[in-house]
Image (tube, rainbow, N blue to C red):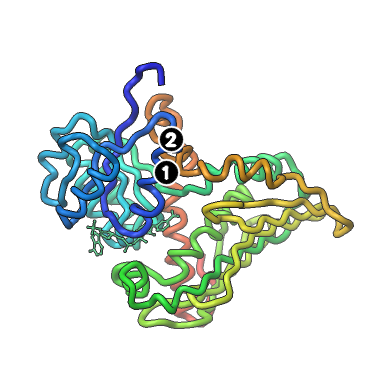
Amino acid sequence: ANGKRKFGYAVLGLGKYATEVILPNFSTAENSELVAVISGDKAKAEFYARKYKLGPNSAYTYKDWAAIARNPAIDAVYVITPNATHRHFTEAAFAAGKHVMCEKPMATTVEDCDAMAAAAKKAGKQLMIGYRVHFDPMTRDVIAQLKAGQVGKLQLIQTANLENQLPDRDLPYLKWRLNRAMAGSGSLGDLGIYGINASRYLSNQDPIAVRAHEIMHVNDVDGAMSWTLYYANGAVAEGASSFGSAGCNRFAVIGDKNYVEIQPGSSYYNNQARLFSNGHGNDHIFQQPYFQKFTATQWGHQLDALPASIASGKPSAATWQEGRRDVQIISAIVRSAGNNGELVD
Ligand code: NDP
């Protein structure tokens, strides 16, 4: 807009999410644009550079960091690779002097999160996590309403992020997700992270302890997991995730006055929230036409949040601290589930 140069992203890792969702959604951003792609496969990078009509120096491989560093059009690298590789690619991007947007979960261990944060600090660049739901205007409205006391005193949060993906278990995108070394956990870190993150933004609190049970085991990870997060004020958040269940994407926030039902709660499209007053009828506070108009641009808002944060010096809604906190909770849940549901602080 107004002749001002847009913030340039190089998308790294041209798998399912990058090619099906992120690349096409650059068109919904206002202040950001796709300027390059980085892949292990040079021909794939060249294919997407052509498809999105990128300029001459725009198709790179993971060996081209010196050239990426020299390209002034690239302001940030957007890392969209298997979870265990996030640290490596994030550190490489910071060493090349770029800002980083890294997909969720931030990493597979808290130690890796700390190394990534240290690399950002050393480079003097920003590290943001790809929590797209934070940029869904409907979700932001719900958060504001809850902060204003809409449900009264918070008692219970319920989150379910359940999908039936196991028939795809031999496809590349799911194969690494069922491998603990590559993914960190199974359905928990991939899908359950939305519920864990929502439990934090819907309660505006961090849990002080967790307890968990695995519902289904696949390879060396959870195929389905169930957990309880305990808050200091006595409220509780119950969550579940699954790769092998009937699909359900639902958050509920129950207080002593009202209850908010968000279903779907962390979907790509059509997220919707309704307020129920004491179970008598319901007020549709977040209506369909409203969210349909805006939800398709959650990625555009997310992409624009990084340059906005750099320009203003104010943290975005998806800081690395948010990412680290969720990785910490995921680790505690895995530990509890592995120890018969013991309470983990
Ligand atoms: P895919 O398996 O489809 O793609 C991952 C890509 O990473 C590969 O295609 C490959 O790209 C690259 N890559 C780099 N190193 C490796 C490696 N060692 N093994 C395998 N691939 C490698 O996964 P997704 O796109 O589904 O997921 C990628 C990330 O995005 C994950 O962290 C996931 O959690 C996150 N995600 C986030 C979503 C959201 O809504 N925020 C939704 C879906 C995923 P290339 O061939 O170009 O080198």
Picture residue at 41% right of the left edge, 51% below the top: 21
Residue 88 shows up from this direction? yes
Name of the residue lying farthest toward the right: 280
Name the side, left or right, on which 140 lies relative to 82.
Answer: right
Q: Distance from label 1 to label 2 (Cα)?
A: 7 Å
Task: Check disc 1 and give the amino acid type.
Answer: Asn
Name the secondary structure under disc 2.
loop
Q: Callout 2 environment at 10 Å: few (<14), some (14 to 19), or many (20+)?
A: some
Q: Callout 1 environment at 10 Å: few (<14), some (14 to 19), or many (20+)?
A: some
Residue 65: percent from the left, percent from the top? 14, 44
Residue 90: percent from the left, percent from the top? 26, 48
Picture residue at 43% right of the left edge, 46% below the top: 321
Name the secondary structure under disc 1.
helix
Q: Is residue 149 above or below residue 323?
A: above
Disc 1 residue: CB within 8 Å of ligand 1 = no
Residue 64: percent from the left, percent from the top? 12, 46
Q: Which residue is mark 2?
A: 29
Name of the residue lying farthest toward the top: 2
Picture residue at 18% right of the left edge, 57% below the top: 40
Residue 59: percent from the left, percent from the top? 18, 44
Name the side, left or right, on which 253 lies relative to 177.
Answer: right
Between 146 and 58, which is closer to the camera in this rendering?
A: 58
Check contact, mark 1 vs mark 2: CB within 8 A.
Answer: yes
Residue 271's disc number? none
- Quarter of the picture containing the N terminus is top left
Task: Check disc 2 and give the amino acid type.
Answer: Ala
Q: Quadrant of ligand 1?
A: bottom left
Residue 120 shows up from this direction? no
Residue 25's disc number? 1
Disc 2 residue: CB within 8 Å of ligand 1 = no
